[in-house]
Each structure stands twice: as structure tokens, then as C-alpha cells.
Amino acid sequence: MQAKSLSIQKVIFTTATLLAVYLLFRFVLPLFFPFLISAVITLLLYPLFERISKKTRVSTTILGVILLLLLLIVSGFSLYFLGTVLVSEIKALTEKLPMYKETFSGCLTSFCCSIEHLTGMDGASLEETLENNVTLWISNAKSSVGSTVFVQSFSYIKLLLHLFTVCFLALISFILWIKDFQHLKKLLKVSGMYEFCKKLYTDTTILLGTYLKTQLIILVITCTISVLGFVLLKNPYALLIGIGIGIMDALPFLGTGCVYIPCCIFSVFQADFYHSAVYLTLYLVTALGREFIEPKLLGKRFGIPSILILILIYGGIQLFGLSGVILGPLYALFCYEITAYFTKNP
């Protein structure tokens, strides 16, 4: 009877933990996001600052300010360089749109001729239908985008101001976290929650750090392979397209196949087997690379089956939206750590 009562208590406690952590992630976390981000960065860098401070006798606060300035300078120059290249490619693409429209028309004619040869359909009628549909789609897209931009322009401005505020608060709070780090550490020890918070932080950084590191490695590899592939094809927008494909591959339930497979099929209908072979090779290399690298880096580090990680990510997306890619696994980790701690320490 007592065992049954304890079992019921565990079920109730676990359910309450799941609900409490969900409410925390859903409503509280967004309110304190800038401070949490700066706190995590502080926890990661403070040991390094402490070692440097002991050798140089420079305060950790000053070291934090110096590092912050260096990061801002490097990030600014990197974004400026990358932005300049991307803007030049977008400008060149815009200027050559009429030429690409003619090229597309020629490709469409060739495609319809291939369909007529393979199936016996009327190629001219098919081409006219496709051209009318494409023209209608472009017209609708232009009107939709124009109205959306006009209606939501104030929302975009509000979003930019919000992002600026978040970044500003994160920068300021980073310095303040470093300044008060030792004092906050003492308060945690006095409260008796230091060991629990330390373990939770360690497990969270291992999980999040390994996951982000894995995705960053895959993103860099995919972008590099894609850019090199389009350079091989002598595409003048290799950097723009390669980065776009890499970002698309990083998004949940999308992949490089969304670009490479249609390009491959279209090249086949144009009898351009060289481009088709390159697109197919790029798709296979990037897709197989992700399938090989991701389980190796994630599964070995956590000892968790890859299917469980996928389930956690999918569940996180359903609960928290796109941010659930990260929040899903973190939600499971927080629930596990809290339940385990209070079960062992009633």
C-alpha cells in the first residue's frame, strides 16, 4: 500500500514538473532571454577570465569589456565583408533578371519538347499553360508581398527595435554578470542549490554545446560543398546560393534535396547531363554527410539513440515553434534533472 502511494506521488510530481517546466519555457524564458544568454556566456568564459586575471592582475570586469569590444569589432568586419559580397551578388542577379527570364523561357520550351517526345502530349499547349500559370503566380506573389510589406512595415520596425534592445541588454548584463559573479555564487551556496544548479548547468552546456557544435560543423560543411559545387558549375552567385542551401539544410525537416533534386530533374529534361550529375553528386555528398556526421557526434556524446533526439526536436517544434529545435531537448533535460534531484533528495 505504501509502495503504491509512493508511486502515485511520483506520477503527480513528474506531471507537475512537466507542466511547471513547460510554463517556464513558454512564458518566463522569453521575458528574461537577454539575461539568460549573457549569463550562459559568462559561465562559459569566467574561468578563462579568472586565470588571465591571476596572471595579469587585470580585473575580470575589464577583461570582459575588452573581449566584448574585440568580438564586436571582429563580428562587425566579418558581417560587413559577407554582406558586401552578398549584396553585390543580389544586385547582379536583379540586373540580369530579364536575361534569365529569356533563358527560362528557352528552358521551358526545351522541357515541353522533351515531355512531348516522351509522352506524346502537345508541347506548345503545355508550354502556354505553364507560362500563363507562372505569370499568374508571379503577379499574385508581387501583390501579396507588396501588401504584406506595406501592412506589416510597422511590425518589422518594432521587431528591429526589439532585437536591438535584446542585444543591448545582453551586452550590458554580460558585464554585470562578470562583476557580480562571485557574490552570486556565494548566494547559491548559502541557499543550498549550488550543487543542483552546477549539475544542471554542466549537463545543459554539454547537451546544447554538442548539439550546436554539431549543427555548426554540418552547416559549414554543407555551405562549403555547395559553394564549391556552384563554383565548379561557374555560377556567378555561388556564395549566395551555397549559403542559402546550407541554411535550408539546417532548418528542421528540410534539406539540400529541396534544391538539388528539382535542379537535377530539370537538367535531365534539358539533356544537360553534366549539370544533372553535379547536382546529384552534391545532394548525395551533403545528405550522406549529415546522416554520417550527426549520429556520430550526437549519439556517441550522449549515448542517446538518434531517433529519440529526432522525437525530442519534433516535439519541441510542436510545443515551442521553430525555437523548439533547441528547447525540445532542453525541456526533456530540465524535467529529468529536476525529477531526479528531488526524488533523491525528498
Image (tube, rainbow, N blue to C red):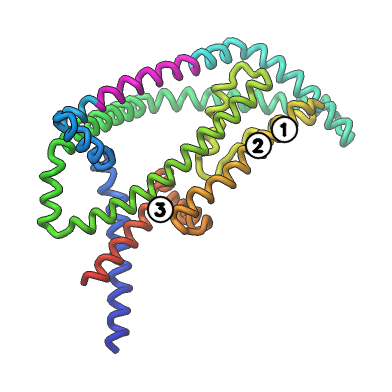
Q: Which residue is mark 1?
A: 264
- Furthest toward the top, the residue is 95
Q: Quadrant of the N terminus?
A: bottom left
State the mark number for residue 283: 2
Q: Main secondary structure of the magenta part?
A: helix
Q: Position of residue 64 (x, y in %)?
A: 21, 30
* Residue at x 31% of width, y 25% of height: 71
Query: The residue tagged with tag 2: helix, strand or loop?
Result: helix
Q: Nearer the viewer, residue 118 or 12?
A: 12
* Badge 3 element: helix
- 10 Å neighbourhood of mark 3: few (<14), some, or many (≥20)? many
Numbered-mark total: 3
Q: CA distance from mark 2 to mark 1?
A: 9 Å
3 or 2: tag closer to the N-terminus = 2
- Label 3 sits on what residue type? Pro
Other residues around mark 1 within 10 Å, as few (<14) / some (14–19) / many (≥20): many
Mark sitting earlier along the chain (2/1): 1
Residue furthest bottom in the image:
1
Mark in the foreground, 2 or 1: 2
